[in-house]
Amino acid sequence: MGASASKIKFRESLTALTTRDVSPEDAAFWDELWKIPSSAEEVFELLTPSNARRLRDERFDNLATLFTQATAQLCQIVETPYTIYFDQALNCVRVLTRVLPFLLEKGDLGENDPNVELLCWGDQGEKKRAGKKKKKKDGKTDEDVSEDEDVDEEQQEPLALLVVHAAMHMMFLPQFTCDFYEEETSPSELYASSSESESDSEESDEESKEERKNDNQTEEKRREARADRETQLEAGLGKVLRIKKGISIHPRPAAVVWAPGVGFTIDGKCLLGNTDDMTNKTMVTRNEQVLNPELAYTRKYDKNRIEVLRLLLAACSDPLFSPADEYNPLASRWMSIAVAADSPNAACLFYSLLNTVISYDPSNSSFGGAKFASDTHIKLVELSAQVLCVLLDCGLSGDPVQFENKHGEAVVPVSEAYNGGFNIFRVLLSRINHGRDLNVLYRGFVRLLRNSFESKNGILMNSQLRLECYQELLVLLWKTLEENPLFLDFILTRCDVCELVVPICYLMNVSRRESAQVGLVHICTFILLKLSGERSFGVSLNRPFRTKLPCDLPLFTGSHADLICISLHKIVVSGSYRLVPLYSCFLTVICNFSPYWRSMVRVLCSFFLMRGTPVANSFNLHLSFVQSLVSSVKLVNLFELFSSPKFLYSGEKAYRHVALLLEIFNNVIQYQYNGNQHLVYAIVRRKDSFGRLASLTLSKAIQQCDKTFPSSGHAEYDADAAEEVAALSIKEVDEKGNPSSREEDDATTTTNGDSTLTGTRERFAPNEAWITELKSSLPMETVDRLLQHLVPVVDDMCERKNGVVDEIEILEVFKDITMVGLLPVPHAIVIRKYQPNQYTSIWFTAFLWGVIFLRSQKPPIFDGKCIELFQVSMNEESGE
């Protein structure tokens, strides 16, 4: 049958399903439907959204038969994987991928149609009891009934479970998505066989050499193990716990994992599991047993893997049909099946998806005949990232505490595995604990995120393939930072975390003006906020920045702290107005690392070019000095901007922006005075700005507010909304991690502000209580003391030289002046850490599915008409 004839025949079959009742017994019709050659594009083109909904709403029996038969055929192909049926299986996969989202529109989190409920989940309890009664009436004993139940067990399982489990099995179907493999020997059998072979073997010279080699490998592994244990102790996880019984989370058979990376070497050896108390020979045998030949890393199965991953993604898509304010990450039964402890091949799928993503190297796939294959593999990489993020986005967080059985195999306690909300994928991510694996994970993130600018920065433009899944990568990075405390500690103490900072700042900068990329800037901000809550991050940012980025960042000589400041400045000055709620988070990031910022150099001449505050042009200085001095002046300009009436009276809590800037000044003055005289001089020059704020009274505030915002006007900048976003996501602690004394005071304010998150605000008007709160909240004592001591010094110099003073001389004087005993007792460093909460959790879910929806249009897996999780703007001209 030709391609055009097949397409016509397939169209006729689908038309018949939507226009007339087709009996489940019509074998000729159904057999022909499954055997018609078709592509994924044809299935999605011919079964349009309107036809799919008409089939569901008007011919539900036909849809039920279609769904049931497709599921049954997938279960059959899993049991008997013959290659002659693979094309038919692909047809079933494509049809299920197409119809599942329309079923889920009326599923668990959608409208909850009873027909859909019965089809997907059935009434297993009633069916089981009815079956027992019927068989006993037929004269069968309890034993006979039990045997019949065993035979019919698969038929009694709900179709939803069968679909998800079939998809999980098909991820590793021989000759379909992987090569043939041998069943893996259990650790207990491996240990026993190793002991027997030791007693019976006779050592030869070659065996002695091999043993010496193995001894060296063992010693190296022990050194790595000691380093890993030290890292675990630093992260507060303690030692690995041994338990007698548990559910294995070891990938078995390991030979089917799709790519090297975490837990797997390039030559296919599995390195997972603790082998400290096993003999060296046992360890060697074990590695040989789980050998994953290099052919197993072939890309010839990429197309089929993509098809099955789309099916699993469609099966887990019911969050799309829940309103964001009602979404419950524990409510989806479909996703609960996929992430359950008994989900088939879950560990293999986790390592396959993770390694497919992090092992990809765009620089190795640029030229020659591999271009087409690379395009397919890039699609697999992107889809793997999406599916993995989805599977990590439900259930409860995994426990990072390591458990293993007596054979050194990672396990989960039974009590934990069968608790509600258990997610095996989150557990597996949280328990990546070997230094080599954490390094592989980190290097993968760095390599892929740096592709965002390296693909445009080569000698030849576009000399390497460019990924488009940066948003998925950032979500995966965020999930890893949140789930795995060892990973966060590892990248801050053993890696150059600045390698991550550069692509994050680049992506924020190039996305700042695009409304469609607001979510990307949000997640980059949250990552920086998460990292900035750690002291070692602030120290690391002092490393010099030398990378040339292909964007409109100005050239500068400085550190990575300066790079962050430039990027955040660009967003404030020329970013989308929808990024205003992030301003408080931006300042918090800078405030967190400001106590460790050794020197503000030329960077800040770019950072705070804030809406045109003029700089004195009378300096007669060397160019390098002007650049550094102007940078410090512009930092103070930001203070002037946020303390101006336009910003200060834009909301009741708008003064908190000023408070954060004052805290930045205080941190630099108290802890890094010697390297930042230019900032000190800039503060002295703008002493009047600080004085005006210190002397602010209620009458002045009311007068300024009425002048700036007439009675009929409203503030363009909603400072309260911005402050609430930050308040919900930030927790103040000291350097030792203890809650700050100010945290309790802010708690009441945050709670009271929650009700206004979605409400309409009235224009703010200053009052006595607001003035009192502002005065008590602004930490101006350090700056006041600084000005009280240094302003007379500058005035005296000007008087002695008749007003003609070289600013370089003033800076030299500032360097020689000691502030010891003049400033207040150095305040405790306050660090504001990211605090997980339901609002940001829902935001991440909506953001992730929004990205997946936009990137799943070829073919269009999801239709936007009934999506409730976020708003979809439908294009009238484009039709469906």
Image (tube, rainbow, N blue to C red):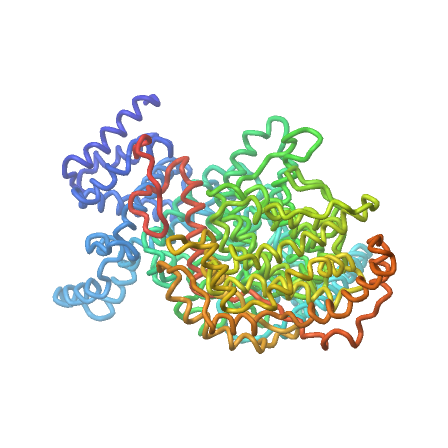
Residue 508 in view: no
What is the count of numbered marks? 0
Report the side of 380 relative to 110 (left or right): right
The image shows residue 62, relative to residue 778, as above or below, that is above
**Which residue is at the front of the view, 607 or 400?**
607
Q: Position of residue 162 (x, y in %)?
A: 33, 53
Q: Quadrant of residue 763?
A: bottom left
The N terminus - image quarter: top left
**Residue 326 x, y percent position in the rendering:** 33, 60
Q: Residue at x 28, y 35 (%)?
A: 48
Q: Nearest the camera: 815 or 392?
A: 815
Query: At which x and y percent is residue 555?
Result: 72, 41
Residue 13 position within the rendered picture, expressed as x and y whole percent measured from the top left: 23, 32
Q: Which of 560 and 457 lies nearest the eye of the viewer?
A: 560
Query: Looking at the image, is 127 positioned above or below residue 27?
Result: below
- Specify the quadrant of the image occupied by residue 574: top right
Residue occupying the point 63% across, 48% down: 613
Q: In this orientation, does residue 389 appear?
A: yes
Q: Is residue 863 left or right of residue 831?
A: left
Residue drawn at 84 percent across, 54 percent down = 805
Q: Quadrant of the C terminus?
A: top left
Q: Is residue 627 left or right of residue 84?
A: right
- Using the image as rendered, state which of residue 67 and residue 380 is in the foreground: 380
Q: Residue at x 53, y 68 (%)?
A: 411
